[in-house]
Image (cartoon, rainbow, N blue to C red):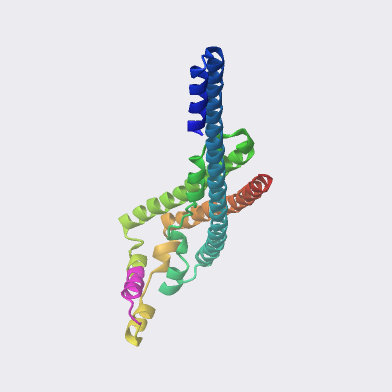
Amino acid sequence: MIKFFRRIRQNLLSEGKTGKYLKYAIGEIFLVIIGILLALQIDNWNSERIAKGTFESNLQFAMEDLEQDKSDLTRLIQERKRVLDKADFILQAVDERKNLSAREIFENSEIMLWKSFEMNSNGFERLLASPIYESPQFQSIREKIKNYQANYQRIKGLEKKLNESIEEMEIEMSKDGSILELYEYSDLVFSLSYAGKEIDAATDQEILDFSMDFEKSFIENPPMLSLFQRGKLITRSIIQQYGYHIALGEDLRKGIGDFMNAQ
């Protein structure tokens, strides 16, 4: 093709048709420019197609994150409801001034264990890196994502508040020694569990015979009672936020699904 155009130019020059040569040269330049513009446009189309495909793939990752969040939150809701039931068992025993065994105290003091929800954010992090994320057509989904992330921060704040409250009360009880028996019993049980040893009859009897002063540890222990009562209040708020987060996630999943179907 290049030889063909060169031959035409040479013929025009040899025939002395300078005017036609100039017109032809301008036309040839014009064709080259059009070719370059077309190539750039095709490259842009290809880049946009690849970016769109990557973005849709990242949307799918985000959908999977939301599904995993829902599963994790559903499990945590059940765990925290069980914790509330156990706390009520302890507090009822306090009200009735019962004398619980060390095993009953240990098994129903789960409110003292730290629990937390960690949001799966791999898909969202990928979306943020795409220019399509800030596009006008993605605005409604972007707002839903921001609401979802903001509620996650509220959840983390409540969990932090609960964990700090537990730590504060534990420090108070460590000072007067009112929590030491619970620590000793926990250490006995956990040391056997982590060692992977089977509990023989002698060890089992040692655990059964372990004596814990329920009156000193709970009934006459304001920091412990405060830990349980305050823990229940915050735990209920956390459960409520977990449920709200699931609802936000479902709404976000629907929005993403509608967006993908419209593309």
Q: Position of residue 168 (x, y in %)?
A: 38, 50
Q: Position of residue 49 (x, y in %)?
A: 56, 42
In the rendered image, which quarter is residue 26 located in? Answer: top right
Magenta: main secondary structure: helix
Above or below, 197 against 214 in this view is: below
* Residue found at x 31% / y 55%: 175
* Residue found at x 53% / y 48%: 58
Nearer to me, 23 or 204:
23
Nearer to me, 229 or 197:
197
Nearer to me, 123 or 149:
123
How many numbered circles are shown?
0
| Residue at the limit of the structure toward the top, as seen here | 19
Is residue 83 visible in the rendered image? The answer is yes
The stretch in magenta equals 185-198
Q: Quadrant of the C terminus?
A: top right
Q: Is residue 132 left or right of residue 218?
A: right
Above or below, 18 against 209 in this view is: above
Q: Is residue 202 left or right of residue 257?
A: left
Above or below, 164 against 131 in this view is: below
Above or below, 255 against 40 in this view is: below
| Residue at the limit of the structure toward the bottom, as seen here | 201
* Residue found at x 57% / y 57%: 67
* Residue found at x 38% / y 71%: 212
Is residue 133 visible in the rendered image? The answer is no
In the rendered image, which quarter is residue 220 located in? Answer: bottom left
Q: Is residue 60 magenta?
A: no
In the rendered image, which quarter is residue 190 located in? Answer: bottom left
Q: Is residue 261 left or right of residue 74?
A: right
Q: Position of residue 38 (x, y in %)?
A: 56, 32
Q: Position of residue 3 (x, y in %)?
A: 48, 32
